[in-house]
Image (cartoon, rainbow, N blue to C red):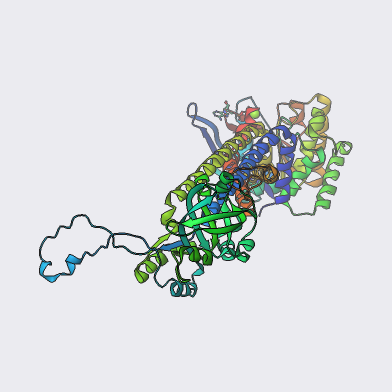
Amino acid sequence: MSVILEAKHINKYFKKPVNFHVLKDISFQIKKGEFASVMGKSGCGKSTLLYILSTMDTDYEGELYLKNQLITGQDSTHLSHLRNKHIGFVFQFHYLLSEFSVLENVMLPAKKLAEKSLQEIEHNAIQKLKILNIEHLASKKASQVSGGEKQRVAIARALINDPSIIMGDEPTGNLDSHNAENVFNIFKQLSDEQGLSLLIVTHDEDFANKTDRIIQMEDGKILL
Amino acid sequence: MTNWSIILSIAKTHLLTKIKQTSIAALGVTFGIGSYITLVCFMTGLNTMLDDLMLNQTPHIHVYNEIEPSKKQPVSLYDNLSNSFNVIHSIKPKLSQKKIHNALPIINYLEHNDKVLGALPQVKAQIFYIAGSIEISGNLTGINPIEEANYFNMSDYIIEGSAMALQNTDNGILLGIGIAKKMALKIGDRIQVSPINGSIFPLKIVGFYQSGVADVDAIQSFTNIKTVQRILGEANNYITDINVKLYDIETAIPLAKTIEQQFNLKAIDIKTANAQFETGTTIRNLITYAVSITLLIVAGFGIYNILNMLIYEKMNDIAILKATGFSGKDVQLIFMSQAMIIGFVGGVLGLLIGFGLTSLIETIPFKTEALPTVETYPINKDPLYFIIGFSFAMVSTFLAGYLPAKKAKKIDPVKIIRGQ
Ligand SMILES: Nc1ncnc2c1ncn2[C@@H]1O[C@H](COP(=O)(O)OP(=O)(O)O)[C@@H](O)[C@H]1O
Ligand SMILES: [Mg+2]
């Protein structure tokens, strides 16, 4: 199995308000098709780790590899491109552009990537919406759909460029158990059928237990 | 590689959802550009009118024979006294003529100079206008009416009759309107004139002259050169003044100097004669630009403000865009395009408003004694001002958008996402 994401000895400090060693020597790998969850007490550094892995936060020590390529120290435009092409991110709060339609929200990262024609992008976006059972919402304004639906739109958006890995920071944290179950099933299906790698932070014991592997964190360290 | 269609579509959506603020920002630019164009066209129209008033009837170089004391007194010619200190009291100018010696060859010479558009002779005479028992002193100038009309816009100041009529009428006179009013004369009437020590000549009134300066109109009249020469009893080479019009006004000063040296005459160039006039023009221009630039700067601050606000409101959008793979530069371009769209729309509207207002002002009647040819307010609709106005709109919105867009570029998405 090929390695999609690899972290080597990641350390991070917050200098303000006091010097604080938030991530301590984090090393692990995510393989292709692996569905991993991250658990740990609130404040132990899960989100901080995810921001580093997603290349949005570059202020850390250690090395990060995406598909065996070192991405630590790359310039920000290149990192944006990597993020665009290889990483899908789902937040706890459904982060959509509220003035755009559901379909436009999903299409946006693909338009930015600009590898396909507009028709293809639109076709793919509708395809992703279908996978998530929300194609009927395509033309609705993003601000006019419910929370669970928004989260599914965000997942569709994370999928649009057929990324190598999807990262989620408590993507079900704000959903009722029915919707949470739904999202889990979607993730599971993507991992099984399309060989997508997933790294999902969660507080939900049931959710984590159903994943391939649980990464347990405590005080900025990974427990093995 | 920049994907403009998506950047513009995001910019457009942002602007349309904030249509009120966007419109206010654009209206700021519209107002700035509109008033700049109106002001500049109006002010330069006025300037040009005043310049024309001055320049058109003023010769670029005026050549005449000035009565002044000789610079070299006879005593300095006497060798025996050359080393002594000579004091001469009560120097009087030599009794010389007003006549320009050899005027006709000089005119001929000047007209062959390729900087010279035309060199027109004039004969100035002091006379009395006589009607019944009234005698009014005044000036009678002999001219070539048609040429004066061609080179010095004489026709603009003929309110009744024409230069042609004067040219074709032997013993005709173009009477100053002030004299005509005083003596209650109308076209076709006869007026008698008499030189200071001479006999009386009857002249036929063919038209009225109004310069706009009441003091001039009360004494000044025109007739043909031949007629004045006859009244004065002089030969047809008696010329007192030569008025030169040049192709390029900038050559007036050097040419005037050359003429003075070459012919030993007095030659006054227009720049020296009207130095204070230029100052007025400069100051009017300065005020126009100061006011316009102030308006545009105010408009620029409006745009700056609104973009800043927009960026605070769109923090989430910025974070999402960055998280999904838009680079800082993309985000910067999105906000820069918003500024430029506001500038463009506001600028175009400003051009239209400016065009409308100037067109309106152009039709407002403006009648004044001093400017007989002016019917409406003068407007100088030079396309250059529209180009400058529009460019300024784009430049100022660029500057106003630059800082907020730069800020948006630097926003750290992690901070925003964490903040939720
Ligand atoms: N910008 C920051 N400056 C200082 N400390 C921070 C900052 N962001 C987070 N922290 C601290 O780092 C620790 C880890 O935060 P986080 O990664 O959000 O935890 P988790 O997601 O596991 O709940 C927390 O103690 C938090 O207070
Ligand atoms: Mg967290």
Q: How many marks?
A: 0
Is residue A32 something one can see in this rendering?
no
Q: Looking at the rendering, which quadrant does residue A83 occupy?
A: top right
- Residue at image position (79%, 28%) is A147
Furthest residue in direction right, as rendered: A136
- Judge whether B357 appears above or below B67 on screen: above
- Judge whether B145 appears above or below B39 on screen: below
Is residue B13 something one can see in this rendering?
yes
Residue B69: % across, % down:
28, 60
Q: Nearer the viewer, residue B132 or B147?
A: B132
Residue B85: % across, % down:
11, 60
Q: Nearer the viewer, residue A208 or B156?
A: B156
Q: Is residue A43 left or right of residue A96?
A: left
Residue B108: % across, % down:
48, 74
Which quadrant of the figure shows ligand 2?
top right
- Residue at image position (87%, 39%) is A135
Residue B228: % across, % down:
50, 63
Q: Nearer the viewer, residue B333 or A41?
A: B333
Question: Which image quarter holds the C terminus of chain A?
Answer: top right
Q: Looking at the rendering, which quadrant does residue A35 occupy?
A: top right
Q: Is residue B246 left or right of residue B296?
A: left
Q: Nearer the viewer, residue A163 or B163?
A: B163
